[in-house]
């Protein structure tokens, strides 16, 4: 059996087609389409018509590609850039009606749960009590748990794209006072969540997402061409050095650094500040970089729990305030 997932993020639409035999999602094809929604959509503003057209085209092509590889209609979701848009429902309905793909958005807490599941399965039970940080364009997800699913999750408005729009709108490189203001906000937002992680005392901590992967490469981790099975770690001290390095450079020069891609160069500094501040507040000095995240978590949940849980998410999607359709033992931090 082949299944597929489509991830509509702030920069790209990503497709993963995987074989599900044996209970493990083994990828057979991956592909991505550039959208760069974060460059056109400020946090909380509507997605413009031309961006919706590109989104429709990308999702339609992803669906056709999945079919060519023998997979059914993909499990398709959009992250914070669509979730926070005032015209979110209109965008979702447009994509569904024109592509036949039931695109939905996920609550940030559910994103954290699914990402945790992907990391847990990748690292295995030997990782013990596990803390997870995942940064996207619009939000930062934090999770902690001792089992298959997390006991604690939080979704905070600390995405790298969101913070770049808010604190570095024009000046390039940013002024020192802009950087200090960003650090203050991140510390304030993370204070309570970080205290919970410190109290739990995780044995293992992981970072997921392309932003953290690129920062890991900048700080000396092995390049992606070495494959997913090469261990990669990120030291807090190295990330602190990376913050200073990125802050001193304009965006065009950041894109020339090891690991930093041109589409993510602008938001790399905000991502580094969030990552370093989170590690400092939680007391973590060294963390693993995990190649599995939310897409793999969705595939695993589909394999392990069946299709009904995803159908429930799609049914509830028309309500922006809809509760998590999958009951879990979750304590959600307040912002």
Image (cartoon, rainbow, N blue to C red):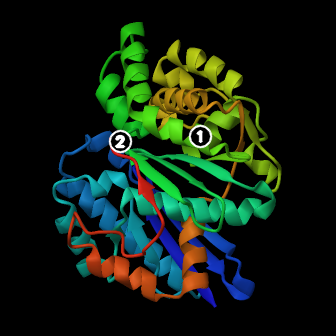
Which type of secondary structure does the marked residue at label 1 adopt?
helix
Q: Quadrant of residue 123?
A: bottom right
Q: Is residue 16 visible?
A: yes
Residue 199's tag is: 1
The image shows residue 57, relative to residue 127, as above or below, that is: below
The residue shown at (49%, 24%) is 252
Tell me: residue 99, above or below residue 14: below
Give the residue at mark 2: 157
Residue at x-position 29% and y-position 57% = 83
Q: Quadrant of residue 207?
A: top right
Q: In the displayed structure, would residue 46 be above or below residue 88?
A: above
Look at 64% across and 68% down and name the residue there.
148
313 displayed left or right of 63? left
For the N terminus, give its image quadrant: bottom right
x and y percent of residue 96 in the render? Answer: 28, 78
Q: Residues within 10 Å of mark 2 (few under 14, many from 20)?
A: many
Distance of label 2 from label 1 (alpha carbons): 23 Å
Q: Position of residue 127 (x, y in %)?
A: 77, 55
Residue 109, how many percent across, how many down?
Answer: 42, 58
Q: Is residue 228 visible?
A: no
Instruction: Give the vertical position of 200 relative to 300 (above or below).
Output: above
Q: Residue at x 36, y 75 (%)?
A: 325
The local secondary structure at tag 2 comes to: loop
* Badge 2 or badge 1: first in the primary sequence: 2
Residue 120, quarter of the rendered image: bottom right
Percent across and percent down for residue 35 are 39, 53
**Residue occupying the far top of the picture:** 176
């Amino acid at each position: 059996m082949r299944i597929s997932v489509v991830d509509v993020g702030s920069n790209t639409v990503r497709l993963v087609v995987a074989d599900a035999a044996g209970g493990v999602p083994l990828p057979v094809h991956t592909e991505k389409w550039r959208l760069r929604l974060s460059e056109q959509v400020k946090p909380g503003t509507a997605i413009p018509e031309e961006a919706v057209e590109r989104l429709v085209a990308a999702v339609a092509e992803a669906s056709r590609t999945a079919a060519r590889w023998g997979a059914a209609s993909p499990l398709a979701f959009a992250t914070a850039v669509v979730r926070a848009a005032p015209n979110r429902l209109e965008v979702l309905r447009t994509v569904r009606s024109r592509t036949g793909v039931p695109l939905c958005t996920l609550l940030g807490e559910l994103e954290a749960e699914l990402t945790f599941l992907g990391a847990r399965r990748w690292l295995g039970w030997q990782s013990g009590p596990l803390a997870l940080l995942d940064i996207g364009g619009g939000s930062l997800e934090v999770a902690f748990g001792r089992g298959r699913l997390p006991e604690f999750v939080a979704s905070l408005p600390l995405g790298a794209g969101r913070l770049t729009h808010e604190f570095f709108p024009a000046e390039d490189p940013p002024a020192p006072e802009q950087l200090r203001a960003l650090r203050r906000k991140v510390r304030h937002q993370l204070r309570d969540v970080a205290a919970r992680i410190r109290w739990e005392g995780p044995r293992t901590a992981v970072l997921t997402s392309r932003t953290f992967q690129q920062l890991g490469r900048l700080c000396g981790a092995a390049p992606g061409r070495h494959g997913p099975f090469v261990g990669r770690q990120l030291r807090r001290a190295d990330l602190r050095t990376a913050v200073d390095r990125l802050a001193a450079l304009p965006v065009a020069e950041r894109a020339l650094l090891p690991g930093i891609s041109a589409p993510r160069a602008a938001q790399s500094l905000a991502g580094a500040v969030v990552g370093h501040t989170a590690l400092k507040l939680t007391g973590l000095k060294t963390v693993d970089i995990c190649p599995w995240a939310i897409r793999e978590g969705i595939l695993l949940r589909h394999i392990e729990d069946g299709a009904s849980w995803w159908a429930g998410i799609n049914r509830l999607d028309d309500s922006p305030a809809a509760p998590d359709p999958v009951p879990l033992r979750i304590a959600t931090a307040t912002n």
